[in-house]
Image (tube, rainbow, N blue to C red):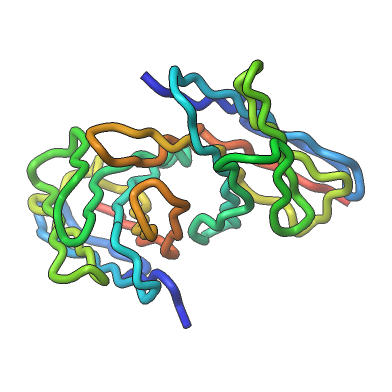
Amino acid sequence: AQSVTQLDSQVPVFEEAPVELRCNYSSSVSVYLFWYVQYPNQGLQLLLKYLSGSTLVKGINGFEAEFNKSQTSFHLRKPSVHISDTAEYFCAVSLYRSGYSTLTFGKGTMLLVSP
Amino acid sequence: DTAVSQTPKYLVTQMGNDKSIKCEQNLGHDTMYWYKQDSKKFLKIMFSYNNKELIINETVPNRFSPKSPDKAHLNLHINSLELGDSAVYFCASSRQPSTEQYFGPGTRLTVT
């Protein structure tokens, strides 16, 4: 079975501070990993993805994530957050079964940026 | 310019009614999906179609029936709506089943 764990349901942080949103996954095979952001009352937008190659992945809006195979983690980081980064962030793993793949999502982490 | 669109954006209806949600993508993708997001923001896959063929059907009640008239459209019909069906439903598409998915804006369904 494959699962995704986002350890923090909510992360409060002050503007311009660094932030890390944690994601751990369990899988017995190689995986594809994704981070999505959901702004209030909107759909999900892809932030970044890891398919293969360099373990440090850069995405949109200044976010980056590092794939760590030994720790089965894919933590999301930003060195300096803005008020506009306030949103729900979802980590997802591509699950391969029956010849096809689908995404399994974590429960999400709400990033709350205050002035 | 909208990549994945859904209609309607909001849907309020009474228990027992039948309703449909439509989804269209103009990205030329082969694979489309329906997800349900509950009140706690948890996202769960419901269905997936690849080239108009159903490839993933999670443990969803038979009252939910997806239909894909062509590769660009995946509609969701729900019979005999129940209170527990209240949620936000997201459509998504991807170039292939294993690549990143692009999501629509969601349809907020409220069953009273």
Q: Pick out the residue farthest to the bottom.
A: B1
Residue nearest the viewer, comparing A40 with B74:
B74
The relative height of residue B62 versus residue A22 in the rendered view (above or below) is below
Quarter-of-image position of residue A67 = top right
Q: Where residue A42 sits in the image (x, y, percent)?
A: 52, 61
Residue nearest the viewer, comparing A13 with B68:
B68
Look at the image and tell me whether residue B85 can be seen: yes
Q: Where residue A52 sits in the image (x, y, percent)?
A: 58, 40
- At 16% across and 64% down in the image, what residue appears? B68
- At 8% across and 50% down in the image, what residue appears? B80
Residue nearest the viewer, comparing B36 with A100:
A100
- At 23% across and 47% down in the image, what residue appears? B47
Q: Is residue B22 left or right of residue A86?
A: left
Q: Where residue A91 sits in the image (x, y, percent)?
A: 56, 38
- Total labels: the figure holds 0
Q: Is residue A55 left or right of residue B55?
A: right
The relative height of residue B109 versus residue A11 in the rendered view (above or below) is below
Q: Pick out the residue farthest to the front.
A: A53
- At 28% across and 41% down in the image, what residue appears? A100
Quarter-of-image position of residue A12 = top right
Q: Is residue A38 left or right of residue A85?
A: left
Look at the image and tell me whether residue A90 can be seen: no
Q: Where residue A23 sits in the image (x, y, percent)?
A: 62, 29
